[in-house]
Image (cartoon, helix red, strand yellow):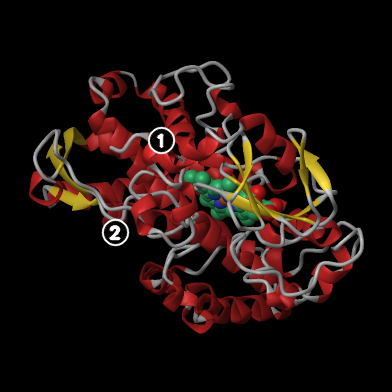
Amino acid sequence: MNDVADIDLADRDYFSDHSILLDPYQYFEALRDKGPIYRLPGRDIFVVTGFAESLEVLNNTVDFSSVVATGGPAWPLPFAVAGDDLTPLIEANRDKFLGADLLVARDDKAHYNSRALLSRLFTPSRLKANEAYMSGLAARLVSNAVAAGGCELIKDIAVPFATLVVADLLGVPDADRDHFMEVIAAGPPPGALDSAVRDESQQPLAIMAGFFVNYLIDRKQNPRGDVLTELATASYPDGTSPDIAELVRLSTFLFGAGQDTTAKLLGNAMRFLIEVPGLQAQLRADPSLLPAFLEEVLRLEGSTKMTARLARKATTVGGVEIPIGTKVMVALAAANRDPRRWENPREFVLNRPKIKENLAFGRGAHVCIGNPLARVEARIVFEKLFEQTSQIDFDAKVHGPRGHNQFDYEPSFIIRGLEKLQLTLAPR
Ligand code: HEM
């Protein structure tokens, strides 16, 4: 590995450089060396690597807009910066930002209203029913993998699991679930580094929208007392009703937001489980440690490396002036390794104090609405794996011999996760 000082920051472009994918942390450490908030040379982008500074940005929805959260901060603004508050210009040009009609990129009242609709889905009773489904589904997927002597964790277990869990949460009819899975598995990850994938019509979300239009129109006309009916007839906090397009966007976005992220968390966690000496034996002996294990994985190797905001007003972060119209990349992965917040930040430590304060799921108004679900999903998959196997290892035929393992990471500036993880599973 190169020394941090060897990296010439001006020569590296985080948003297109595939060489950063393998170890983004080294790049973030080089940025941290310049300060917890640092302007990229020659660009209108600040990168925040500090924990406290990240919180400052995420909690400040007055000065920052989320309009760049989906597309990332690298694209030029579709308007000339003018005045002392860009909000009217952002709203007038929102359709020119990538994915800016999605919940995560909305601001103010539009965000509050849409989020309130979704919160109705994530009720404790709904999550409990969903958990029963998860348990059965995970047991089935794991049992197939064990019978085969091994699996490619991402494709064979993680992606189908994460997709079907959201399908269940939304009440997608059984008959359509396999098709959903195929469509999503074929699509690119969020924040793909290669521009060829920007054809929106090929995006899985666009295809899935077709299904949801039909479901929701049907449920509006013929209410059935299922989850889709609840969504189709839901109203905003002020009593007005969302239109079908809004409901479709929200439903399909849940797949986009909850599928790759959760699937990659499973892969990242598995890598730690196998690589950290003694960890697999310790967790097998006491599976009640699984939530603590997953939390430390989320801190060290969460599946979302960053999010972004646009300064719609002139403001400051960590005492640094942020001019109006500049973009801020909040490097969640770096904040989670900030030595001012975490002792020995690069080390894997089970049961760190206040570990749940990690920023893997963001913070503030846009904090991940699916975070309780993702945590349960990951725990259940590991529980089922422990129940049905006596030992899990990397498949040396694919990843090389112990101590010289090789892995490829998803080419995305947002997602941190293994493209593939081939495992051998010894049955119990
Ligand atoms: C390990 C798994 C996951 C990770 C690491 C993750 C991470 C994140 C992060 C960092 C944000 C905030 C983005 C921002 O502030 O700009 C977010 C938002 C969101 N996540 Fe997740 N997520 C995960 C799983 C899920 C799941 C399972 C669902 C739902 C089924 C979900 C639904 C959402 C939604 C709807 C938002 C937007 C919330 C808003 O803007 O108000 N996520 N997620």
Which residue has dot 2 on it? 155
- Crowd tier of the residue under label 1, counting other residues whose Cα lies within 10 Å: few below 14, some 14–19, many 20 or above: few
Seen in the picture, residue 353 relative to 412 is either above or below; the reply is: above
Which residue has dot 1 on it? 5
| Res 268 quadrant in image | top left
- Which one is in front, 426 or 12? 12
Residue 36 position in % (x across, y down): 62, 34
Residue placed at 43% from the left, 78% from the top?
196
- Mark 1 or mark 2: whose residue is earlier in sequence: 1
Which numbered tag is attached to residue 108? none
Residue 179 position in % (x across, y down): 39, 74
Residue placed at 44% from the left, 73% from the top?
176
The answer to whether residue 334 is left or right of residue 1 is right
The answer to whether residue 370 of the structure is visible from this angle is: no
Residue 255 position in % (x across, y down): 52, 62
For the N terminus, the quadrant is: top left
- Crowd tier of the residue under label 2, counting other residues whose Cα lies within 10 Å: few below 14, some 14–19, many 20 or above: some
Residue placed at 69% from the left, 64% from the top?
231
Mark 2: secondary structure: helix
- Which one is in front, 161 or 412? 412
Three-letter amino acid code at disc 1? Ala
Task: State the CA–CA distance, disc 1 to disc 2.
Answer: 38 Å
The answer to whether residue 271 is left or right of residue 336 is left
- Which one is in front, 192 or 11? 11
The answer to whether residue 257 of the structure is visible from this angle is: yes
Seen in the picture, residue 381 relative to 181 is either above or below; the reply is: above
Three-letter amino acid code at disc 2? Lys
Mark 1: secondary structure: helix
| Res 274 quadrant in image | top left
